[in-house]
Image: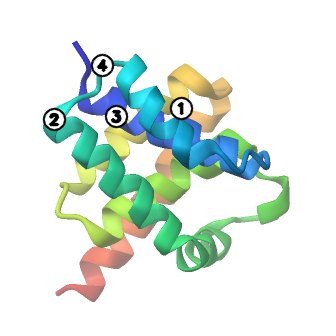
Amino acid sequence: MATITHAREAVIQTLYALEQGNEDAVKQFHELLKERKIKGSKAEFAKKLLNGVLEHKNEIDEIIKEHLIDWSFDRLDKVDKQILRLGIYELKYTDTPFQIVIDEAVKIAKNFSEDKAKSFINGILDRVAKEIREENK
């Protein structure tokens, strides 16, 4: 049975395909959801996430750039970049608790990235979450 994590993974895979220049990635996203049996509210959740990241991509990328220490945005691993984009979108634009967003991002990084990516992604998302919470006080 498909989970919310599977929905997030489909979003990240689609964002990655777009980054690689696949202009049909959004069309293929709907097929990916069907293949993975991501249906109903989980499919709607995935569509909302994908559309949200795409809509706010420039702003999200600026947030990523602000939080990179001794690293350039262009050197970021392409998968890690998509995980960060999705995580920051969820932190900033949804009501998903920040602990869940960060845990999900780290879990996905374990499956799709190198070992060191987990702590890197965790660190950036944690700092962004703290800033968002401070802004909302």
Q: Quote the CA–CA distance across marks 3 and 4.
A: 10 Å
Quarter of the image for residue 48 reads bottom left
Q: Say few, some or many: other residues with alpha carbon within 10 Å of mark 1 (under 14 / 14 to 19 / 20 or more).
A: many
The residue depicted at 31 percent of the width and 48 percent of the height is 101
On residue 7, the disc is: 3
Q: Nearer the viewer, residue 26 or 112?
A: 26
Q: Give the labeled residue for mark 4.
A: 37
Measuring from the top left, give residue 71's x and y in whole percent: 80, 61
Q: Quote the CA–CA distance across marks 4 and 1.
A: 22 Å
Quarter of the image for residue 129 reads bottom left
**Count of residue discs:** 4
Visible in this render: residue 96? yes
Question: Please, what secondary structure does the residue beneath circle 4 have?
Answer: loop
Q: Quote the CA–CA distance across marks 2 and 4.
A: 10 Å
Q: Give the labeled residue for mark 1.
A: 109
Q: Give the labeled residue for mark 2.
A: 40
* Kind of residue indicated by mark 1: Ala
| Nearest-to-viewer mark from 1 and 2 | 2
